Each structure stands twice: as structure tokens, then as C-alpha cells.
Image (cartoon, grey):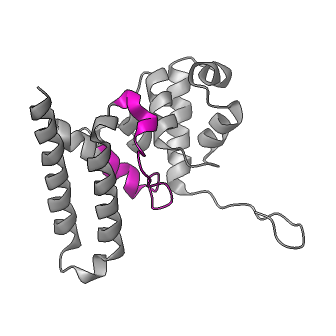
Amino acid sequence: MELSNGNKIKKEKRKEDIDIGMRIKLARQRAKISQRELHESTGISITQISAYETGDRTIGLNNLSLIARMTDTTIDELYFGPKSKFPISQSQNTGELIVNCVTALFDNGVIDKKNVSKNMFTDVEHIGFVKFNDILEDLVNQLRIIKRDKNDYADPKSIKKQTLYAYANKINTRLEKQK
């Protein structure tokens, strides 16, 4: 950011971005991949990779999934660390896994009202969300409403839990119809 007098203000790093960046760097090093090699295999610029690793930039779902794939790790490991903390993969239910993933990305600010748009999940087609695009867009909108109106609910956690359950069921129903 720049002030009117030309001086620059350093943007404060978010703890989540620093933690995610550290895990990205560790995963890359574990995979014995340089930033240049990661750039060449993902198309993410070296500058961006460096900014993610230092926590200077918030990573989006598409780039997170590309890095996870190239470092032979998972999105939730990059986001949440040790396996004991994986909120995304605690279920064997496909609908719950997808809903938990999108919810975790929403809760961590990767998906927010600025980037909710038509076909928001088509950019990450390779992780399989595109066939649920309409359901997931609606889920994100419901999460926004719950977050915005949380003080209006007697038990906002219960409302959120019921909402997530309903959307997981919608995904599972669609999967059953596709068989």
C-alpha cells in the first residue's frame, strides 16, 4: 500500500498465511523441489511461490492444489499441519470431505465474498469440484450469511453444522445419481 505522500505501508502478515507458507516450504523441501522446479511444473511464478512461503501473500485454492499435487502432499496438510489436525479428511463420506474442504477454505479467508462468482470452482477442475459448482457456490453464500448473521442465531455453530450436513447430502445425492 502507498500513502498519499509516497511512503509505503508494509502490509501486516496474517498468522495463517505464515503458517501455511512454512508448510508449503517444508513440503517443497521434503519433495526435493526447488522454487524454480515448482514454478516450471505448476506455472506459478517464483515470486508468488516465495511470497506464499514467507506468508506475504494468501494462497488461493487453485495454486494450493497445484502445490499439494507437486509436493505429494494434501491440501489439508498444507493448511492445517500434522494429520491429527486435519479437519477436512476426518470423514470417509465424499460429500463431507468436499464440504469440509470448501468450508475450511472459507473459514481461512481463501474463499470470501470478493471471489465468490459464477463457476468459481471451474479453475480447479482437476480436483473434481466443478461437477458440484452450483452446490458449492450456494454453500459459500450460505456460509457468508451464517457468518454475517451469527449474532442473530441462538446457536450459530449448530446452524452451520446443519448447513454443512445438508450440502454434503446434496453432493452425495448427485454422486449416487451419476452412478
* Along the line of sight, the residue nearer the viewer: 129 or 17: 129
In the image, is residue 164 part of the stretch drawn in magenta? no
Image location of residue 158, percent across then percent down: 16, 67
11 versus 120 height, above or below: below
Residue 71 visible in the picture: no
Residue sticking out furthest to the right: 5
Image location of residue 8, percent across then percent down: 82, 63
Quarter where residue 2 is shown: bottom right
Q: Is residue 50 left or right of residue 104?
A: right
In the image, is residue 114 part of the stretch drawn in magenta? yes
Q: Is residue 60 left or right of residue 170?
A: right
145 versus 92 height, above or below: below
Image location of residue 130, percent across then percent down: 34, 36
Quarter where residue 101 is shown: top left
Residue 86 visible in the picture: yes
* Along the line of sight, the residue nearer the viewer: 121 or 96: 121
Please give the range of residues in magenta.
101-127
Q: Quadrant of the N terminus?
A: bottom right
Q: Quadrant of the C terminus?
A: top left
Q: Residue at x 31, y 77 (%)?
A: 149
Quarter where residue 151 is shown: bottom left
Q: Residue at x 34, y 56 (%)?
A: 140
* Along the line of sight, the residue nearer the viewer: 106 or 177: 177
Q: Residue at x 60, y 47 (%)?
A: 55
Q: Is residue 108 left or right of residue 39?
A: left
Give the mark count.
0
Q: Residue at x 44, y 24 (%)?
A: 69
Image location of residue 4, percent across then percent down: 85, 73
33 versus 75 height, above or below: above
